[in-house]
Amino acid sequence: QYVVRIIFERAYDGSLSTGQTPENLSILEGSLLGALKLIMLIGLVIISFGPSYSYTLLNLLYGGRYSDGEATAVLRYYCVYIIFLAMNGMSEAFLHSVANEKQLKQSNDILLLFSAIYIVLNVTFIKSAGAIGLIAANSVNMLLRISYSAIFIEEYFKVKS
């Protein structure tokens, strides 16, 4: 996330939130969209092949002890979680690189709320589904954060255009 944030901050003279020309804004929007598409493509490849090979990987690394248990199912769900994690990292990096001080404070307040929701979901889901519940709680948390970042990004480009 920090690498992406630095790239967004440095790509356009160190300050994206001020002095943007429509041309630079268009390039920035295209860069963000391209990066998100790349993340989606990589994530979809992991989702496509990861679950199918999780049993084989666990069997090769740890033998039948883990490959025949819950670990294979957990790995399958984790393959889906990876795409949420990557999309969140990219979208939050962009948000934090272009937001002003007031927007960053609002973002931190919202993230604090999402953390409280995550704690409640974590306890609830782990009690009902174990390790898979942990991944589900993390996935819901990432979806909430992605949604907030997506709304911010949409507003950012709408206002700047």
Image (cartoon, helix red, strand yellow):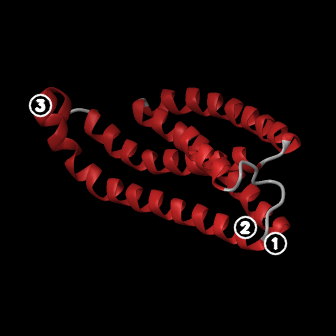
Earlier-in-chain disc, 1 versus 2: 2
Q: Amino acid at mark 2?
A: Leu
Question: First in sequence: mark 3 or mark 2?
Answer: 2
Asked if the residues shown at circle 1 and circle 2 are in contact, with their CB atoms under 8 angstroms apart, the answer is yes
Instruction: Kindly state the secondary structure of the residue where label 2 is placed.
Output: helix
Q: Quadrant of the N terminus?
A: top right
Name the quadrant containing residue 62: top left
User: Measuring 84% from the left and 45% from the top, which residue is drawn there?
Assistant: 100
Q: Is residue 123 above or below residue 86?
A: above
Q: From the viewer's side, name the closer residue of 65 and 111.
A: 111
Q: Nearer the viewer, residue 75 or 45?
A: 45
In the picture shown, does residue 48 fall above or below 53?
A: below
The quadrant of the rendering that contains the C terminus is bottom right
Q: Which mark is residue 161?
A: 1
Front position among marks 3 and 1: 1
Image coords of residue 90 (percent x, y): 57, 50
How would you rate the neighbour count of disc 2 (Cα within 10 Å): few for under 14, some for 14-19, many for 20 or more? Answer: some
Which is more toward the observer, 145 or 100?
Answer: 100
- Image mark for residue 58: none
Q: Which mark is residue 25?
A: 2
Query: Which residue is at a point 18% across and 35% down the rendered structure image?
Result: 58
